[in-house]
Image (cartoon, rainbow, N blue to C red):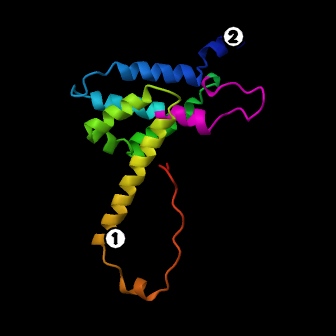
Amino acid sequence: MAETARKTEMTCGEYLTQQRIALARHRDLGAPGAKEQVVECLSNIYAVSYQMNFERREPPSRTRGPAEMETLDRELVERMSRGLRDKAHVFSDIAADPWRLSEAVTTAQHGNGFPLIEMVNTAFLARTAQREAQHDATGPEAPSRQARPAQTPAPKPAGPTL
C-alpha cells in the first residue's frame, strides 16, 4: 500500500514538466480561451517554481536532493496559482501585451522557473508603482493630513502578496 501512495505522489520536476507540455500545446494565442489556459499554465509553473526555490519541505542538509525531486505540495501550488490569477491578477498585464506574453512562455519553458518569478514580480511592482503614482497625482490630500507631522511609511513587500 505504501508503494501505491508513493506512485500517486508527484515530484516538483514531474509537475513542472507536465505544465510545460500543457503550455507547449497552445500555439495559437488568438484561439478562444487560449490566453486563459496559457495564464493558468504560467501561474502553475510560477507556483511550483516558487516551491522549488523558496518553500522546500526538506530542510537543508547534505542528504537533501535537488528541488526537482522533492514531493510536490499540491495545496501550496494550487492556492498560490489560484491567488496569482484570481486575487493578485499578476498575469493580466503580461497577457495584455503579446510580446511580454511570448517572453513569459519562453522563459517558463526553461530552467527552474526562477526567471519567470523575476518577470512576474517586476510586472507586479511596476503595476503597483503606476497605481500609486496615479493615486498620488489625482487624489488631493486632506487638510487634516497636511497638518500632521510626516510619518515614515511601512516597508512594502517585494512581490505579490496573497
* Quarter where residue 55 is shown: top right
Give whichever of 139, 152 is nearer the camera.
152
Whether residue 112 sits left or right of residue 55 in the image: it is left
Give whichever of 111, 63 is nearer the camera.
111
Q: Is 67 inside the magenta-drawn segment? A: yes
Q: Earlier in the sequence, mark 1 or mark 2?
A: 2
Q: Where does the image place residue 132, in percent across and percent down from the top left?
A: 37, 64
For the point 39% across and 40% down, the residue is 85
Image height check: is 159 above or below 103? below
Q: Which residues are magenta?
A: 46-68
Q: Crowdedness of circle 2 by 10 Å Cα count: few (<14), some, many (20+)? A: few
The circle drawn on residue 136 is 1
For the point 73% across and 35% down, the residue is 59
Image height check: is 139 above or below 161? below
Q: Return the residue found at the far right.
A: 62
Image height check: is 35 above or below 138? above
- Is residue 42 visible to the viewer in this orientation of the structure? yes
Q: Secondary structure at mark 2?
A: helix
Q: How far separated are the C-alphas under marks 1 and 2?
A: 59 Å
Image height check: is 126 above or below 90? below
How many circles with numbers are drawn on the protein?
A: 2
At label 2, the amino acid type is Glu
* Quarter where residue 34 is shown: top left
Q: Where does the image place residue 110, in percent across and percent down from the top left?
A: 46, 26
Q: Quadrant of the N terminus?
A: top right
Whether residue 158 sits left or right of residue 41 in the image: it is right
Q: Crowdedness of circle 1 by 10 Å Cα count: few (<14), some, many (20+)? A: few
At label 1, the amino acid type is Asp
Q: Where does the image place residue 29, in percent across and percent down from the top left?
A: 25, 27
The circle drawn on residue 3 is 2
Q: Where does the image place residue 78, in percent across and percent down from the top left?
A: 50, 33
